[in-house]
Image (cartoon, grey):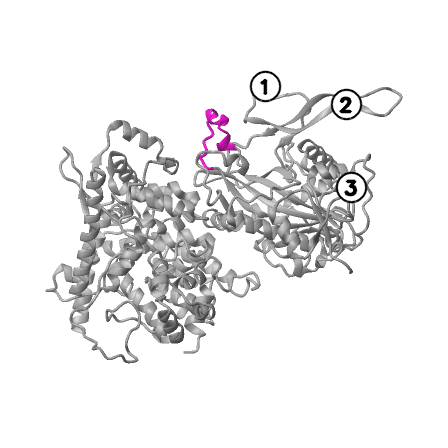
Amino acid sequence: MLQEESDLSLIIAQIVQKLKGSNLYSQLERQAWASLQRPEIKLESLKEDIKEFFKISGWEKKLQNAVYSELSVFPLPSHPAAPPEHLKEPLVYMRKAQGSWEKRILKSLNSMCTELSIPLARKRPVGEQKELLNKWNEMGTDEPDLSLFRPVYAPKDFLEVLINLRNPNYENGDSLSFRTHLGLIQVPLKVKDIPELKECFVELGLNIGQLGIDDSTQVPPELFENEHVRIGQKVLAQQDSAAAQQYIRQGSPTALRAELWALILNISSQPEDVLYYEQLKTNVIQHDLLVDSLIYKDVKLTASNDDYYFVFEDYLYQVLLCFSRDTSVLSHFAFNSASPPKSYIRGKLGLEEYAVFYPPNGKIAPLCFLYHEPSKLYQIFREMYVRFFFRLHSISSHPSGIVSLCLLFETLLQTYLPQLFYHLREIGAQPLRISFKWMVRAFSGYLATDQLLLLWDRILGYNSLEILAVLAAAVFAFRAVNLMEVTSLAAAEAVLADLSTLKVMPLLQIFLFATVT
Amino acid sequence: MAGKVKWVTDIEKSVLINNFEKRGWVQVTENEDWNFYWMSVQTIRNVFSVEAGYRLSDDQIVNHFPNHYELTRKDLMVKNIKRYRKELEKEGSPLAEKDENGKYLYLGLCVFHRLMFSVNIPRRPVQPWIMILSHRFKKCVPKDSKTSSFVSQSNKEAYVISLYINNPLLIGGRKFDLRLYVLVSTYRPLRCYMYKLGFCRFCTVKYTPSTSELDNMFVHLTNVAIQKHGEDYNHIHGGKWTVSNLRLYLESTRGKEVTSKLFDEIHWIIVQSLKAVAPVMNNDKHCFECYGYDIIIDDKLKPWLIEVNASPSLTSSTANDRILKYNLINDTLNIAVPNGEIPDCKWNKSPPKEVLGNYEILYDEELAQGDGADRELRSRQGQSLGPRAGRSRDSGRAVLTTWK
């Protein structure tokens, strides 16, 4: 008990420390000072009165949301003597792997620079700055020559790195047993099995109403939908992050989704935030990074050709270009094993650091369906990236990290669909090779937009990406009959090529709760 | 029941021909005995013209109404709508209510004002206007007083002046319009179906209302045929969104009520336009027609009717497009030619629910009137058009609307 208490006080102290530096703190302070004018605040009971005032005016709620938000990203308590790298990633071999992966990316970037004689970063001349400012809203229409730019890496390369991960302390012997993992991932991380997943995702159960199932046209709205919408509106009125997170496990009504996500991610659009975004925009105008061209090329290839997202092409450029210059994102990497390659701006201003991230553009486009104000869109994207999506691009042992997701997927398939798994393996179509690209993009670009948003509702609700692996397994289960008949990797790919007609919630429900195990 | 349906067409499009062939229909020429003729608008003119003396037999169906131009020619549409409004006003119908500025509250459907022969732009237009060619025609004078033949004298053009919507709803900074397909099987009683899979067509360049851009065809006109020649036209997706995508976007960013209201208004516009021309339309029982409705939405989420096409394009710009148009024709034929058998134009034109495919009943006058006249008054006024207006598809009634 004593240990728990001291852990708790440590956490409290750390959160307080963190919040003291935040905007909320100064706002609360201001409010407290202003409240002294109010008649109900008396000197004798100053502390109590101010607390009461905060409760009534909604400021306590805001503080609550902020604390809750910090808790969601806080690492677990650890030994006081643990070094910081250990906090980020406890397993040494994972750290090493991530380190060498990063070095590889940087090397690739540098060699591209040398090849094309383009600096990694440079300051733009004034004329060019003006030009860019003018066409800020239509960057999609400009078509510089990008043929020489290669993407830094493809998902396939990343998969190869993950496949080659080995724990040097683990030796499972040469003898095959029923325990042998037949998949591609060969590291012994703990992943959940279906009974554990059922416990974890209990709100997706068969007897609980869901949006994505119980709001279809055949079901009268009185049964579930109307009440669910009402509750959603109440949650928003209360502005309670924790309640919103619980609520959204059953899906979010389309009209409430934008606000609910903002509440859960604890994003409120203050003037300072808009200013911050404008600052980033200025950075983009002033400096040209090599990665900008990569971003440009990536967006052109993917989003521009997508049936749903092509409309938002210009927003994607704006957000990504700003994002690649956002140093505040770096602070969140204190909790992640990744340290993204940094590049340095040459110039008289001295060295300024800019981080170089691999453009995750697929994850922004669906957000454009919810937020059309650029700085809000930017904030939401940034928060989603630092909470969830970065884990899809880096090597770590975190349960929501891509390694764990891959292992979870393969384990689920092998355990619950052994015949299918074995068959696919025999024909040279390891299932992970097909599903990897879905998971690494969080299914963006593969599912219909409304289905994708329902899926991401649950990511936010459960604060975990595990559902991506479960969905991937559920898709294989759904198409099992056809897959059993194919005889090549290409044919298997063809069966799973088009996910745009799938309804994710029934698939998840059936796989978790209605499959005989 | 004997024999296969014989079809003719003068529009060589694969989406049509594939649909005929998959039903096992037999292609013939127009001089032979045919059952089904998918014709262009020029041909329909000839078929039904007085000189041709064509008489269609009971087992022959064509895909146009003889005087469809009452709906598709802009000046005539205006005339018909104005007449319709006046009639409603005379009846004292609440639909014809006007606001304090004399503007119709519920019947301000479309952007056109009628104009013939001369240009009469208001001196200081508050909003920009554009002139749209309504139609070309030849002005004819009688050859001589004894005969009744005419000789064409000069080529004339008739224009309508259109209110220019300079505050269109923009998505991703781009202007777009909606293309919706509406099938009419009979005008009296009015029975029409709306295709669920309509789509939005986007401009490739960003919209700016500045006047210097007014000359840039690509910004303002969204017809695909014109967009294709713009530099930024993308061949893979053709700048289209499904209507359900649009709905998702609007519900997410603007809320459910206003989105439902928007879609209700769109259905309203379509039905009113059809009702307006129904009295003057030649309700030939050999005819059905599939119209392409072009609608634009302004930034207050009010829809405006731009035009109605009697011969919506069957060219496909992308693979998805081809699939959509193929299915459109498929569902249309299922409704117009029941069971794919040799048609009998005397049938009651009431297909069973199962064959509708991606169509849903937009308005069925027979069913609506069967409900009794008292429903008429309960229409636009007090009724809130709730979410159910777009929902249950079980009954065969006018399910897309809560009004009759």
Give the residue number, with chain letter if any, for mark 1. B123
Tell me the amino acid under the disc marked 2: Cys
Tell which tag, 2 or 1, sits nearer the viewer: 2
Same chain letter for marks 2 and 1: yes
Give the residue number, with chain letter if any, for mark 3. B282
Magenta stretch in the rendered image: B204-220
* Residue at point 72%, 38% (across, down): B43
Give the residue number, with chain letter if any, for mark 2. B140
Q: What kind of element bears circle 3?
A: loop
Please tell me which of labels 2 and 3 falls first in the chain. 2
Which residue is the extreme one toward the left? A81
Chain under numbered label 2: B
**Tag 2–tag 3 contact (CB < 8 Å):** no
Tell me the amino acid under the disc marked 3: Asn
Please tell me which of labels 2 and 1 falls first in the chain. 1
Tell me the amino acid under the disc marked 1: Arg
* Residue at point 30%, 49% (across, down): A382
**Tag 3–tag 1 contact (CB < 8 Å):** no
Q: Judge the density around disc 1: few (<14), some (14-19), many (≥20) Cα neighbours within 10 Å.
A: few
Where in the figure is residue A187, as x and y percent of width and height? 23, 69
Where in the figure is residue A470, as x and y percent of width and height? 37, 67
Q: What kind of element bears circle 1?
A: loop
**Tag 2–tag 1 contact (CB < 8 Å):** no
Chain under numbered label 1: B
Tell which tag, 3 or 1, sits nearer the viewer: 3
Label 2 – label 1 distance at C-alpha: 32 Å
Please tell me which of labels 3 and 1 falls first in the chain. 1
